Image (cartoon, rainbow, N blue to C red):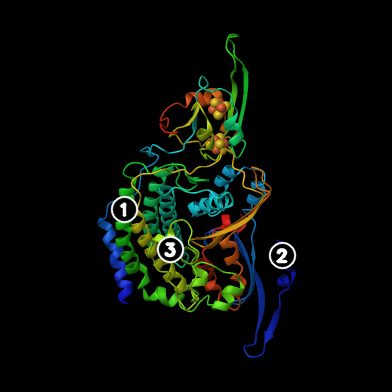
């Protein structure tokens, strides 16, 4: 991305009132900075402690996933999607499988659908836990990070048992999933759900009620529903302004229409609201998990009827699902071959990040990291 | 400051909680049976069908075959087989397509070396990597 040249011109002025000369200054945050959660650079122009302008510079992690996909067949693309939103690889796996399955009209066996929903919701919780821990680390609390990673570790262990990897799962296949649940795995997930339900209470005791924390976040990074829609924000960023929009509810995919759950919303649109929503979402995910584990089919196939060579018919498709960060979409244009002619991912982190310069304008520099963290970006997904 | 005190209370309670840390690498870290570690390759099973090299998304498998030494028998046997672990992403696709289970995953995962060249593993090395071989493939 080229630099915006206007930003580099810095003003200095003499204030009659105080008798002081003030000067604007450019501050470069990142690309290697612990609070940018990846390789992300933010150039801010500050006057004293006030941010005048800011410019996010992205692309350090760009691997050209969409272009690479044009040279790969559909099964080969799945491991690449693991590396986009690497905190929630299961939802990424799902979106590409869902797109191809929609194009080819493949029926998914029930058991595979349930396994998919279970792993996606577990991944949502894991992703929110990482956010919770690192966000509090950003604003200065150390211990929540340790607790969050302790509990996330349990999810990763369960995934490791299921598909043999802790982060880059490559678990779903077009038409189903690669592995069936190993013996006793479902019981272990049930145990975990029970454990986390208790832990969530402790998380609230540890952080949510803390007065310093509430005062720190209330009223900063605020925007309204119209702005959110204008910037095409999604996920918690959108729901924190009062718009009730969750694709699991509004355009149910997989077997989500069989479960009862709420879509938490808030109206404040500030960092605190986003914190509360993500915590509430963990609770809702646990609710979905409980129901999915309860209704889990005793037996059945895990792969549907899939042709040996996957060749979606000529045409195009766009599907979208709800990832922990917002709406993730997958667009495929096929010319009937076994490789896509063009593939495009709508990545929520990328869209959500766009609002950052607007939110930072006029803010105090000490709020910068708190606002950036509340957007919850994953740089692998921003840059793809 | 009630909320603040409550939070501190939870932290203090952890003093008596069970430890969750592992003593890796002093104590080896066991991985579950399905874990995708470094591959084991059995040359005698390979039928040189090239499927693994074709499915590999990062094109890190290089293989060549040679005619069967016994002129009575048809087909080929494997001559060289290399995996470049600089770019292998342990995605499991090669082991999934192999019709004879010549290439299978193991539970070994310690790949760190001092030189990048050492990550280029050949047939003999992959054949010798025969501990903790995964059972279901
Ligand atoms: S695990 Fe994946 S990347 Fe590695 S050799 Fe096999 S197919 Fe290639
Ligand atoms: S897929 Fe298996 S049998 Fe075929 S070439 Fe590869 S290792 Fe050999």
Q: What kind of element bears circle 1?
A: helix
Q: Quadrant of ligand 2?
A: top right
Which one is earlier in the sequence, the residue at label 1 or at label 2? 2
- Label 3, on which residue? A132
Residue mark closest to the camera, 2 vs 3 = 3
Residue A331 position within the rendered picture, expressed as x and y whole percent measured from the top left: 62, 56
Say whether residue A323 is left or right of residue A202: right
Q: Position of residue A79 (x, y in %)?
A: 55, 45
Q: Residue at x 58, y 34 (%)?
A: B115
Answer yes or no: is residue A151 visible.
yes
Q: Earlier in the sequence, mark 2 or mark 3?
A: 2
What residue is shown with label 2? A3
Does residue A47 appear left or right of residue A147 in this picture? right
| Foreground pick, A328 / A218 | A328
Q: Which residue is mark 1?
A: A190
Mark-to-mark CA distance, 1 and 2: 51 Å
Q: Quadrant of the C terminus of chain A?
A: bottom right
Q: CA distance from mark 2 to mark 3?
A: 32 Å
Determine whether the residue tagged by mark 2 lies in a helix, strand or loop. loop
Q: Chain of mark 3?
A: A
- Cα distance between the residues tagged 1 and 3: 22 Å
Q: Is residue A193 above or below residue A224?
A: above
- Which chain does the numbered disc 1 sit on? A
Where residue A380 sits: x, y (%)? 57, 54
């Amino acid at each position: 991305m080229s630099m915006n040249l206007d930003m580099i011109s810095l003003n200095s002025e003499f204030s009659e009132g105080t008798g002081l000369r003030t000067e604007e200054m450019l501050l470069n945050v990142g690309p290697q900075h612990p609070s940018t959660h990846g390789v992300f650079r933010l150039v801010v122009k500050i006057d004293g402690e006030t941010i005048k302008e800011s410019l996010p510079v992205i692309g350090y992690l760009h691997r050209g996933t969409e272009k690479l996909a044009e040279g790969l067949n559909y099964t080969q693309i799945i491991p690449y999607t693991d590396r986009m939103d690497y905190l929630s690889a299961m939802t990424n796996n799902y979106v590409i499988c869902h797109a191809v399955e929609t194009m080819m009209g493949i029926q998914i066996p029930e058991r595979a659908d349930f396994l998919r929903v279970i792993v996606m919701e577990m991944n949502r919780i894991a992703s929110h836990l990482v956010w919770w821990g690192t966000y509090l680390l950003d604003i200065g609390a150390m211990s929540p990070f340790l607790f969050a990673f302790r509990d996330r570790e349990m999810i990763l262990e369960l995934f490791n048992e299921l598909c043999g990897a802790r982060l880059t799962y490559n678990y779903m296949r077009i038409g189903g999933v690669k592995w069936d649940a190993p013996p006793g795995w479902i019981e272990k997930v049930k145990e975990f759900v029970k454990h986390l339900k208790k832990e969530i209470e402790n998380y609230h005791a540890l952080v949510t009620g803390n007065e310093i924390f509430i005062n720190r976040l209330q009223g900063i990074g605020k925007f309204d529903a119209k702005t959110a829609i204008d910037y095409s924000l999604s996920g918690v960023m959108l729901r924190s302004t009062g718009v009730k929009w969750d694709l699991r509810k509004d355009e149910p995919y997989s077997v989500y229409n069989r479960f009862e759950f709420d879509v938490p919303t808030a109206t404040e649109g500030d960092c605190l609201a986003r914190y509360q929503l993500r915590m509430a979402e963990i609770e809702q995910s646990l609710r979905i998990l409980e129901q999915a584990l309860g209704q889990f089919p005793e037996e059945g196939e895990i792969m549907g009827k899939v042709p040996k060579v996957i060749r979606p018919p000529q045409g195009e498709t766009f599907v979208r699902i709800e990832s922990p960060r917002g709406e993730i979409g997958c667009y495929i244009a096929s010319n009937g071959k076994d490789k896509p002619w063009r593939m495009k991912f709508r990545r929520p982190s990328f869209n959500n990040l766009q609002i950052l310069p607007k939110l930072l304008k006029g803010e105090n520099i000490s709020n910068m990291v708190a606002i950036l963290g509340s957007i919850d970006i994953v740089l692998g997904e921003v840059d793809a | 400051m009630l909320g603040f005190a409550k939070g501190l209370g939870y932290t203090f309670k952890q003093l008596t909680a069970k430890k969750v840390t592992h003593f890796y690498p002093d104590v080896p870290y066991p991985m579950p049976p399905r874990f995708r570690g470094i591959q084991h390759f059995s040359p005698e099973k390979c039928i040189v069908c090239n499927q693994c090299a074709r499915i590999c998304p990062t094109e890190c498998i290089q293989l060549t075959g040679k005619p069967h030494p016994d002129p009575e028998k048809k087909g080929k046997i494997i001559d060289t087989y290399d995996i470049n672990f600089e770019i292998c992403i342990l995605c499991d696709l090669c082991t999934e397509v192999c019709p004879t289970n010549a290439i299978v995953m193991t539970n070994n995962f310690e790949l760190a070396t001092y030189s990048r060249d050492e990550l280029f593993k050949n047939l003999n090395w992959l054949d010798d990597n025969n501990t903790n071989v995964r059972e279901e493939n």
